[in-house]
Amino acid sequence: MKLPMVCMQCAFPTNGEAPDSTLYSLPVREDSVYEFTCPRGHQAVTVIQEEKFEILFEIAINAIVDGYYRDAVASATSSLERFYEFLVRVICHAHEVPIEEFGKAWKSVAKQSERQLGMFLAAHILHFKKAPELNGDQASFRNDVIHKGLIPTKDQAIKYTNDILGLIRPLLIEVKTSLNESVQALAMVRLKERHSRLGETPRASMVIGSTVSLTLSVTEPHPTSIELSLKRIEERKAEVSKRAK
Ligand SMILES: [Zn+2]
């Protein structure tokens, strides 16, 4: 996936020149910090605000648009796993577990997704007093794709990604409704980390408007399927190629 960026100094010039909102496509990054030099020599730095699971879900949808259906299944799976981690982190924060203690505990499960699932189940049942819905039906399909090299069709990739959305969406709404204070506190920690290495460098902040979204308010409609997102990304790609350099 590539993210379209503008140079803010070109887009909002202070020297009377005409605004230039050319889009520059940058490959998606682990650290969420996007730096480039525009043709006029401005250093442009943009920090993306989304959580990892939101970005991975967008990568999955982009992969479907681009025809990489195996990659879509892998990224949707990773998105769900990182969402579970996020949820455990939020629940721990709400129960006043120090962030360092959470970090120590997570270290013991970080390399095995089955262990992480166990931690998610325990945190969920203790906090919400009910068992979470899990993706039992999709697990064998996912294993066939990831471990046996199955090449899924577009329809299979869309169905799988929609199923993952169906697992994340209700929990995300629940978390934003009942644990919003912890969600906001952890967002501040995340942004502080991302901004920390930039020092005094001027930078812009951006949300990519992901399909599973922490920034969408609970009263706004949350997408129940990825079809509109597929259309949005196709249209954005057309717009980028029109305005790109
Ligand atoms: Zn510029």
Image (cartoon, helix red, strand yellow):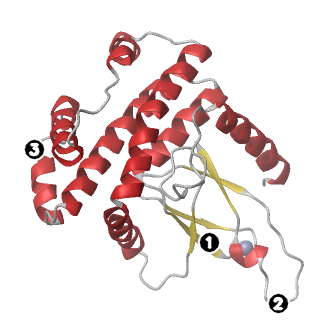
- From what the image shows, is residue 8 above or below residue 73? below
Query: Given the image, on which type of amino acid does mark 2 rest?
Result: Asn
* Nearest to N terminus: mark 2 or mark 3: 2
Depth check, front residue: 167 or 63: 167
Can residue 2 be seen from the camera position used here?
yes
The residue drawn where x is 54% and y is 58% is 217
Q: Secondary structure at mark 2?
A: loop
Tell me residue 184's x, y (percent): 38, 67
* Residue at 37% across, 75% down: 196
Ligand 1's quadrant: bottom right
Reading the image, the residue beneath label 2 is 15
Q: Is mark 2 within 8 Å of ligand 1?
A: no
Residue 79 as seen in the image, left or right of residue 208: left
Q: Which residue is mark 3?
A: 108
The answer to whether residue 41 of the structure is visible from this angle is no
Q: Nearer the viewer, mark 3 or mark 1?
A: 3
Earlier residue among tags 3 and 1: 1
Q: Residues within 10 Å of mark 3 (few under 14, many from 20)?
A: few
- State whether residue 136 is above or below residue 206: above
Residue 215, percent from left and from top: 52, 59
Q: Secondary structure at mark 3?
A: loop
Q: Residue at x 28, y 56 (%)?
A: 90
Q: CA distance from mark 3 to mark 1?
A: 39 Å
Residue 126 or residue 78, whichever sits in front: 126
> How far separated are the C-alphas under marks 2 and 1?
17 Å
Badge 1 residue CB within 8 Å of ligand 1: yes
Residue 142 placement (x, y as % from top left): 38, 18
- Amino acid at the residue labelled 1: Ala
Label 2 – label 3 distance at C-alpha: 55 Å
Judging by the rendered image, the residue that carries numbered circle 1 is 44
Q: Position of residue 223 (x, y in %)?
A: 59, 40
